[in-house]
Amino acid sequence: MRDSVIYLLFFALGVVLAAVGLIPDTLLSGEISKWILYLLLFFVGIQIGTSKNIFRVVRSFGFKIVLIPLATTLGTFLAVALVSFALPNRSVIDCLTVGSGFAYYSLSSILISEYKGAELGTVALLANIVREFLVLIFAPWMVKYFGRLAPINAGGATTMDTTLPIITKFSGADYVVIALFHGMIIDFSVPLWVSFFLSIQ
């Protein structure tokens, strides 16, 4: 839990420094963030290369590895459908549309804003950012109480990029290939699901 507190403090520090204008414009560029992510993925690649158990883990799952992104999809849709009953101003379809972003906030929020307006697009942006952030903060807790696959399922589309380093640390390097496979499948499914729910409104 100590690591989660440290992550949260660094996040809060970044928000405060940016809000008061103490961050140089060069650091606000998306290019910097992209290269930092590339560096993190490089180190994850090193861990994969040095791990002796990765292929054993993948073999142990076999065809069942496909069930992991399926569980993420069904679990997400069930959860957002239940949440929709607590939101009288939003339909079940609206909530499913937002949930089908699977933490891929940049793509889903743009699609939703274009077809449903800026309000629901903003909701999608915030909801999917929060989903990613919760994995970054609570991954150790998820692993402890729900198992090594929990942060992978919770991470949605982000398990192939932004949450991969944290998943590697707490689920173990053996689960990196599973996280990459899961993230790739969910990532490709986002525009399909979002478009589907938008089409039936």
Image: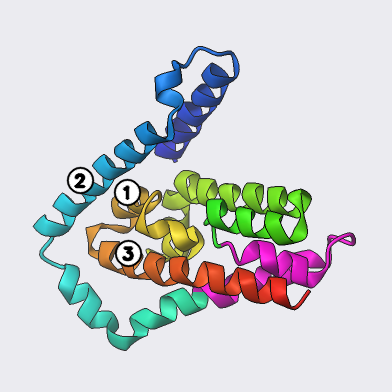
Label 1 sits on residue: 165
Check if mark 3's residue and mark 2's residue have beta carbons within 8 Å. no
Give the image quarter of residue 83: bottom right
Assign a secondary structure to mark 2.
helix
Check if mark 2's residue and mark 1's residue have beta carbons within 8 Å. yes
- Report the disc number at residue 180: 3
- Residue at image x 40%, y 58%? 159
- Image: magenta residue range: 72-101
Quick one: quadrant of the C terminus? bottom right
Q: Amino acid at mark 3?
A: Leu
Assign a secondary structure to mark 1.
helix
* Residue 145 visible (yes or no): no
Q: Position of residue 137 (x, y in %)?
A: 48, 43
- Choose mark 1 or mark 3, whichever is in front: 3
* In this rendering, position of residue 57 left or right of residue 159: left
Report the coloring of the rendering: rainbow
* In this rendering, position of residue 100 left or right of residue 88: left
- Report the disc number at residue 43: 2
Q: Amino acid at mark 2?
A: Phe
Q: Position of residue 198 (x, y in %)?
A: 70, 71
Q: Position of residue 132 (x, y in %)?
A: 51, 50
